[in-house]
Image (cartoon, coloured by chain):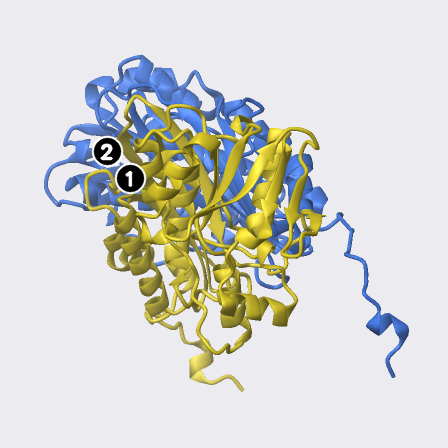
Chain colours: A blue, B yellow
Amino acid sequence: MRTPEDVSCRAPDTNTDVIQLAHGGGGRLMHTLIEEVIRPAFDASPLATHHDGAVFRAANVPMAFTTDSYVVKPLFFPGGDIGSLAVNGTVNDLAMCGAQPLYLSAAFIIEEGFPTADLRRVVTSMGEAARCSGVSLVTGDTKVVDRGKGDGMFINTAGVGAVQAQTPIHPSAVAPGDVVILSGDIGRHGIAIMAAREGLAFETEIKSDCAPLWTPVRRLMDAGIELHCLRDLTRGGFAAAVIEIAEAAGCAITIDETAIRVPADVRAACDLLGLDPLYVANEGRFVAFVPDADAASALALLSQDKVCADACIVGRVSAGDAGGVRIQGPYGTTRRLAMLSGEQLPRIC
Amino acid sequence: MRTPEDVSCRAPDTNTDVIQLAHGGGGRLMHTLIEEVIRPAFDASPLATHHDGAVFRAANVPMAFTTDSYVVKPLFFPGGDIGSLAVNGTVNDLAMCGAQPLYLSAAFIIEEGFPTADLRRVVTSMGEAARCSGVSLVTGDTKVVDRGKGDGMFINTAGVGAVQAQTPIHPSAVAPGDVVILSGDIGRHGIAIMAAREGLAFETEIKSDCAPLWTPVRRLMDAGIELHCLRDLTRGGFAAAVIEIAEAAGCAITIDETAIRVPADVRAACDLLGLDPLYVANEGRFVAFVPDADAASALALLSQDKVCADACIVGRVSAGDAGGVRIQGPYGTTRRLAMLSGEQLPRIC
């Protein structure tokens, strides 16, 4: 039998503790969500107006443009969260083009039922990360998908930057004689995510290395270091980055494995999980390819930034064996580094 | 009892008919997917290099920057698909800023198990839509989420354009005396999606109006029409756009409902479903706020483009009742147009 409740026209659900489908509908609820939760993290200048897009005046230099979606799981992890990751990741892609990060967009795909408090936390983290890199969040978008059709929250950021490099920073500029500088230890981000996702407890808490990289890159450029190629070591880790560059440059690269720092706790976790740290993702590390003559100065400059304090030379570029990367292990053995077909750890960014 | 199959180390799944998690892993599978399926739609120039971002030289004019994610369901519908929608939607947001669309990014979040053939179809559609608007897809990203944690495919596009408007096109420029021009009939997109999603069959197939709008906007600007504000009529439809502009401009707007064209089949579907076409989303329609003196010329110019062939004046701006929108119905009655709290139809874009 139908009760009166069944046939009554219920008032709209005004519970704003969780995100509802209606929050993505372009109506009053969406406007309130944007104004109260999301906009505070965005640039307050007239740039970010209530309009279909932001307008900025570009300097008369080449501009870099990049995008990344972030589907990291879990959303919060030691050393960061999806918000800081989404800002730093795109800031770093611009930095790797030799570009000063200027403007970011932020687009959210939120699953119905997502806690509004978590959205607020993520957005606050994005605002902090943006301020830290001197970049402005200027335009955005919010979509809501029905329960079970997403996974909490996905974020896309796109970034625009002003290229400061005098010569193109690109794999094709890599040449025999270049040295490979690695900006720090490797493996923290991937293992931190894995531990948080699977509830693994190690003796020490492994924190993600998630960090912005524009400051050290600018320092190298300002000092006139001849930067041939820069690449941050995200999906696929150090190995994928170096192999990609070797293939694109048509050069051979030899890596000295003993020069690569892997924190003891990361190495222990990798041993336990059967992972090779060379392939584990990082979010605050990069490789720089520079001429041998500039290597010492580059290292001295990088050491001025905490995020690059452990920078060191880990390899060299030579002619022949186009695209081949060989790595010399601790016992003098040499093996060829191959690209994995997939990824050891899905959804790390 | 365990059979030998249980304990054997199986070879990686090389089925590339469907997207696998490994396709998002930064390894060989992802590279193959990008090179073979995705890159063909992208700009072939050195702009879109194998690097972390694209580099372009901006003209010395203000640049517009915008982003939108697309979560439309279903992915394919009469009159378009998520690919053409993702390109046209962002092209239109740039056009609404008075900006010539130049460069787009495209970021895919794909659910494990998604048919590769469908991805190819979507990407091809994006390439065609981009060529149609003279915009270049220059940078992208591909992520894969596990089965059940997405919904086939979500796409984000961000766009950069060169602002051609001499004066800012913005709600704050709207002034008493302006007329409201509507570029065509309304309601097609939302109803087309609804029909496709729910398997509703009407006597005629209702097609989405999904279309790029830069050409008619440029035509207005080239002719020196004083454009105060432009807004495309997506989520929330005509009503939300006009209410938002009235509120931002602090003006009153009076709409003549009898001047608004709703196709007969759309009206019949709306009656059946209990929807008000004023609130139904469109993807190829916009309103333009221009001074009375420019209205006739603007209409004559718009009629030159097929997508705007039915453009007409539907309202006027006046002082007083700041933010209020009143609509005069067919029987001389007047009502206040209110913004919905949510959306009649979720996931229409």
Contact? badges 1 and 2 (CB < 8 Å): yes
Q: Classify residue B215 as left or right of residue A304.
A: left
Q: Position of residue B304 (x, y in %)?
A: 30, 47
Q: Position of residue A115 (x, y in %)?
A: 70, 49
From mark 1 to mark 2, how far is it between C-alphas?
7 Å
Q: Position of residue B330 (x, y in %)?
A: 63, 56
Q: Position of residue A320 (x, y in %)?
A: 10, 41
Residue A305: tell me if it is visible. yes
Numbered label attached to residue A170:
2
Assign a secondary structure to mark 2: loop
Seen as rendered, the residue at the extreme front is B332
Label 2 marks which chain's residue?
A
Q: Residue at x 50, y 70 (%)?
A: B265
Q: Do the residues at pointers 1 and 2 share their chain?
A: no
Mark 1, residue position: B51
- Label 2 sits on what residue type? His
Assign a secondary structure to mark 1: loop
Among the 4 quarters of the image, the one containing residue A60: top left
Seen as rendered, the residue at the extreme left is A320
Seen as rendered, the residue at the extreme right is A4
Among the 4 quarters of the image, the one containing residue A299: top left
Q: Residue at x 39, y 42 (%)?
A: B299
Label 1 marks which chain's residue?
B
The one nearer the camera, A343 or A5, is A5
